Image (spheres, grey):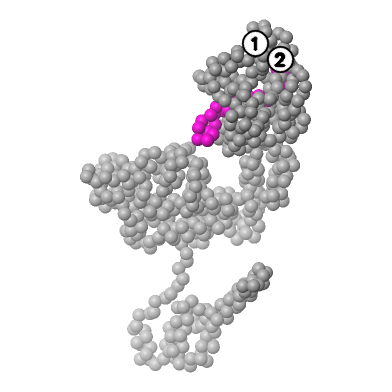
Amino acid sequence: MKNSTPKQREAELEKAKVSHREWVRHNRCWDYNQLCEILPDPRSRMAMLKELLRRGFFVKNQPQDIEEAEDAGSSSAAAAAAAAAPPPPERFVQPAPGIEDCQRILRASKSDVLRICGDLEMNKEGPRTDKTLYRYFCEALLVFKHMQCPQAVEALTDEEWVNRTEQGERVVIGVQGERASSMRIALTKEEEAFLELYFVRIRPENLQPQTDCNNFFVSSDGKAVQSVSRDMNRLHELYKMAPYTSQCVRRAVEAAAKILPSQQKGALLHYLGLSAGVFQLQDVIDAALLLESLSSRSAYETSLETGGAAGGPRRDFMAFVNTFPVSLEGLPPSKKQRMEAGFPENRVFYDKWRASQYAQREKHLLSYYKLRKPSAAKVARLIAQEGWTVNCPRPEHIVQLWRPAPKKMVEADSFVIRCVSEQTWTGLAIKDFGPPEGLGVVATRPFFKEDIVCDYHGKVVTAAEGRAKVHSQFDEPGYVFFFKAGERELCIDSQTSPCECHPNMNTFGRRINHSRKMPNLKPIHCTMTINDQDQEVILFKATRDITVGTQLKYDYGVRRRSFQGEGLTLDWLDE
């Protein structure tokens, strides 16, 4: 197939798949009547039948009671021997564990852990076995609840625990700026309380003065826990439960996450430590909530399979969303799917599901336009790119919902930082308006109210240096901009053009003319990190919609009397 075309290879692959399915269907199925013809001897036939069943073959028309059929075709002595002999071990296929199965140990041990908690809080001196069990439970919370690999749990340090960050109802470990960490998880307040009690009451008792150990989990001999996997096996043994490995846990999560869109899958991989990247606090919390929803969905599916608890499985909207997760690309469940999952056939949950997806899509579309208000045509093109044809917002509706980004978001936006650093602002042009205005700036594309248009670019100096610069320029206009940054009085000096950092550019901000009565821009002060240094920046924001060809102007903040009467002849100051 080396020289074949991709289409030919694809056709051959499909033929191979069909052939494989046929082989499996024909060669793994046997008929008991056929076995009777091939093997007339009953004892040999029964042995063959058991061997086929042990290997996973399907046998049609087999007797309901294999032992009884074997006894009927054998001598009484053989039957007695067979009856006396222990039955052969039955072979069955163990289903792959789900998240619910992996977390069963937490529910089994929690009552004992709560009892130990009460003793610790009342300063009761319990046996060492109780404290070891409590440590096992804390490790199990990270392994089976937050799906962390044992190596990451072993590497958790006391410093990471002390520097945990509280964010709303969650406590995040392992995110301190851009500091690398072996674990990034978002605990609930209850889980934090469990771990804090271990950290304060049990861990100090285990530490030895001569041992230099900064790991969070410490064994009873004062050394760092070397094998969390072994601890988990011991915990399962205590409750006579089959142990699950970390690989089982990961596979259970991957199986449950198959229904998720690619973006959420990526967030989950980050959370599980399977991919690298810089984390934000909210990213970790969102991934933890997503993991919890998968766990809830797994528990709900288990309750459906077993008939639920005494009151039966819940039929609220949360259970509906856990069964049919809302995503940007997903389709709402059909009536048949809803009924097969045990939900009512009416449209109540169906309509709520669509409303949740609609809200998600609104948020997704608005996330593309943080700094500049979009036009309806732009939003329509984005919706077409997403491939949404039903249950999506109208472009005009998204335009109405748009709100300007807060100042902190503007200061951290990579696009604005790049435009300030490289002076790559678009939609602007410098035009000569003749005397007395001279050069000015016009818009070459529409700007909407609250859009960031450009910055006032120059060298940041103190206000005293700026005033000295103005006084030294008697015959020329001073291209300076005075402002306050907290308690500091500063000035942007853009007198030199082109500037030293952009020798081939005529920056726009210094060419924007003045208007006291009809300005369409206003300056805002921001502090931005550019080239790893904090810099004071003045940005211009549109105060109203600006059409193509409109001259950009802002109020310089000066009047005719600003220069002790020397400006009385400057008519342009009143424009």
- Front-lying residue, 540 or 330: 540
Residue type at numbered disc 1: Ser
Measure how far apart labels 1 and 2 are at the Cα level.
10 Å
Q: Which residues are magenta?
A: 516-537
Q: Secondary structure at mark 1?
A: helix
In the picture, the disc for residue 562 is 1
What residue sits 50% from the left and 41% below the top? 280
Horizontal side of 191 relative to 280 (left or right) equals left
Tell me the kind of residue under disc 2. Answer: Leu
Which quadrant is the C terminus positioned in? top right
The residue identified by callout 2 is 573
Dividing the picture into quadrants, the one containing residue 474 is top right
Q: Quadrant of the N terminus?
A: bottom right
Q: Is residue 182 left or right of residue 298?
A: left
Left or right: 360, with 221 as reference point: right
Q: Chief secondary structure of the magenta span?
A: strand
Q: Nearer the viewer, residue 13 or 304?
A: 13
Does the magenta-highlighted stretch encompass residue 279? Answer: no
- In the figure, 327 relative to 435: above or below? below
Residue positioned 58% across, 23% down in the render: 492
Question: Mark 2: which secondary structure?
Answer: helix
Which badge, 1 or 2, comes first in the chain's sequence? 1
Mark 1, other Cα within 10 Å: few <14 / some 14–19 / many ≥20 = few
Q: Is residue 340 above or below residue 64?
A: above
Image coordinates of residue 546 in percent, x first then y, are 73, 29
| Residue 293 on image: x %, y % | 52, 50
- Percent across and percent down for residue 57 are 50, 78
In this view of the protein, can residue 39 be seen by the observer? yes
Residue at 52% across, 85% down: 32
